[in-house]
Image (tube, grey):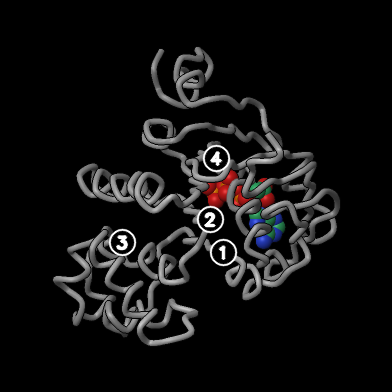
């Protein structure tokens, strides 16, 4: 599986404050062009893995003690956030942080690391094509938009960097089912039409496994189960503990 992996966590161990072992010995493979779901309850370590992948662990006194993070076969665990974005890794953090005082259009402009204006326009038009709602409201102040629209904008901003790998931290959190539908449709299009690779962190296992190709379940810093989504959905433990079916 190694050869076709875009991103790989290998035997990774992460400590906070030199003491709290948030990630114990985790190996995760994200194949090129697929959607991988990372599931698990509160505090399992999902956000910690994403922060490690984005080079922002240091902001919370987190340190990778062991193991490696490989992107296109190269160890990148020592790189900073800007360099990781340049290489094609981008994350939409939990809580859809947008610049509340700026318009949608301005938010998108802030998201791009483009060489030319033409390139920025192209990427913005692609975001508008994926999210027509953002186009309709492009001159409106982001802070006044609904939670769903802000989530779309947060994803749109990440797409302005033209990533190879898009990581989403709980994109469905606190949103109405119909809005979640719309956002999930776009995630599927990113894979199917734009050949993007997606790492989808969710507490909403049902939603995530619906669209993911493969899933990992994390508990207290360890992978306890992984497999193709269809297999996970059929697993009795997964049904009982993560899908609420008994
Ligand atoms: P959530 O859905 O709540 O974000 P999660 O699965 O993403 O949960 P993490 O936020 O990665 O879990 O947390 C993993 C573990 O690391 C938890 O035990 C948490 O208390 C601890 N932790 C997270 N951030 C820090 C920090 N900045 N300092 C110390 N411990 C932390």
Q: In the rendering, which numbered label is found on residue 13? A: none
Above or below, 140 relative to 206: below
Q: In the rendering, which numbered label is found on residue 88? A: 1
Above or below, 82 relative to 168: below
Q: Position of residue 161 (x, y in %)?
A: 47, 71
**Which of the pair 29/119 is nearer the observer?**
119
Residue at mark 3: 152
Is the CB atom of the residue marked by disc 2 within 8 angstroms of ligand 1's nearest atom?
no
Q: Can residue 221 be seen by looking at this rendering? A: no
Tag 3 near tag 1, CB within 8 Å: no
Mark 3 → mark 1, Cα distance in angstroms = 20 Å
Q: Residue at x 71, y 35 (%)?
A: 222
Mark 3 → mark 4, Cα distance in angstroms = 20 Å
Pointer 4 or 1: first along the chain: 4
Which residue appears farthest toward the bottom when viewing the image? 117
Pointer 1 or 2: first along the chain: 1
Q: Residue at x 22, y 74 (%)?
A: 144
Is the CB atom of the residue marked by disc 4 within 8 angstroms of ligand 1's nearest atom?
no
Pointer 3 or 2: first along the chain: 3
Q: Which of labels 4 and 1 is toward the front?
A: 1
Mark 3 → mark 2, Cα distance in angstroms = 17 Å
Pointer 3 or 1: first along the chain: 1
Q: Position of residue 46 (x, y in %)?
A: 59, 46
Residue at mark 2: 165
Identify the secondary structure beneath mark 1: loop
Q: Residue at x 35, y 83 (%)?
A: 118
Q: Position of residue 106 (x, y in %)?
A: 32, 84
């Amino acid at each position: 599986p190694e050869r076709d992996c875009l991103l790989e966590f290998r035997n990774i161990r992460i400590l906070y404050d030199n003491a709290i072992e948030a990630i114990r010995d985790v190996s995760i493979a994200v194949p090129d062009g697929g959607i991988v779901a990372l599931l698990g309850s509160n505090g399992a370590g999902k956000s910690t893995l994403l922060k490690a992948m984005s080079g922002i662990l240091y902001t919370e006194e987190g340190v990778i003690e062991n193991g490696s993070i490989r992107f296109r076969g190269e160890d990148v665990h020592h790189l900073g956030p800007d360099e990781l974005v340049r290489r094609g890794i981008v994350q939409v953090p939990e809580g859809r942080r947008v610049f509340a005082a700026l318009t949608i259009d301005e938010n998108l402009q802030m998201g791009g690391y483009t060489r030319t204006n033409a390139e920025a326009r192209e990427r913005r038009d692609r975001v508008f094509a994926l999210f027509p709602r953002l186009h309709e409201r492009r001159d409106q102040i982001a802070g006044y938009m609904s939670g769903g629209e802000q989530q779309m904008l947060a994803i749109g901003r990440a797409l302005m960097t033209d990533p190879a790998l898009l990581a989403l931290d709980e994109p469905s959190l606190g949103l109405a089912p119909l809005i979640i539908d719309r956002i999930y449709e776009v995630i599927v299009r990113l894979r199917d039409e734009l050949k993007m690779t997606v790492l989808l962190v969710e507490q909403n296992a049902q939603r995530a496994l619906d669209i993911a190709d493969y899933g990992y379940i994390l508990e207290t810093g360890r992978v306890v189960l992984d497999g193709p989504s269809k297999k996970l959905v059929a697993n009795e433990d997964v049904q009982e503990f993560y899908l609420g079916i008994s």
